[in-house]
């Protein structure tokens, strides 16, 4: 019984670490993209239209956040399941 619980916790850890890393990397990329956008906006004249992130970048960030949170939820479920064994 203890070996099975240990294996479930190892699986949970193996899923949680990449998910957390993906969330961290996505957040850093999002901050970097917003900083670049802010720097570009400061160089523009006031009467020019605002700059926004392109749709593909925003979609990529949303997908990465969803995958990262799904990994964390899966890891939590696996860890919770290991306590029930």
Image: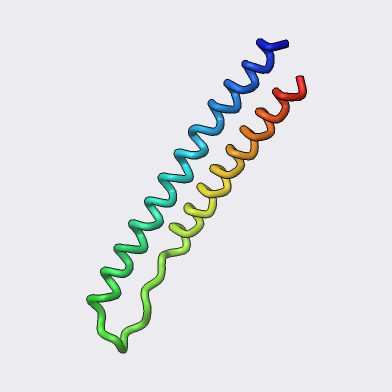
Residue 3 percent across, percent down from the top left: 66, 10
User: 69 or 82, which lies in front?
Assistant: 82
Q: Which residue lies furthest to the bottom in this view?
A: 47
Left or right: 83 with respect to 23? right
Q: Residue at 61% x, 41% y: name it.
A: 70
Q: x, y (%) of residue 19?
A: 52, 38
| Vertical order, 26 against 82 (above or below) | below
How far across and down, in percent of the image, does residue 72 sit? 59, 38
Whole-percent x, y for residue 81 in the image: 72, 27
Q: Which of the 4 image quadrants contains residue 53?
A: bottom left
Check the image and report above or below for 17 versus 8.
below
Which residue occupies 49% across, 34% down? 18
Image colouring: rainbow
Q: In this view, does 23 lie to the left or right of 67?
A: left
The quarter of the picture where the N terminus appears is top right
- In the rendered view, tell whether residue 11 sits above or below residue 63: above
Asked where in the image residue 44 lies, by quadrant, the reply is: bottom left
Q: Residue at x 61, y 22 (%)?
A: 9
- Please tell me how many numbered marks the rendered image carries: 0
Residue furthest to the right in view is 84
The quarter holding residue 16 reads: top right
Residue in view at x 36 percent, y 82 percent: 49
Which part of the image, by quadrant, shows the C terminus? top right
Q: In this view, does 73 lie to the left or right of 22?
A: right
Given the current orientation, which residue lies at the most extreme left position?
Answer: 43
Vertical placement of 76 versus 64: above or below?
Answer: above
């Amino acid at each position: 019984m203890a070996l099975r619980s240990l294996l479930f916790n190892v699986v949970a850890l193996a899923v949680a670490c990449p998910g957390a890393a993906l969330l961290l990397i996505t957040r850093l990329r999002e901050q970097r993209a917003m900083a670049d956008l802010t720097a570009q906006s400061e160089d523009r004249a006031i009467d020019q239209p605002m700059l926004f992130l392109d749709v593909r970048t925003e979609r990529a960030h949303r997908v990465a956040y969803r995958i990262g949170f799904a990994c964390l939820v899966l890891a939590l479920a696996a860890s919770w399941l290991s306590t029930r064994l």
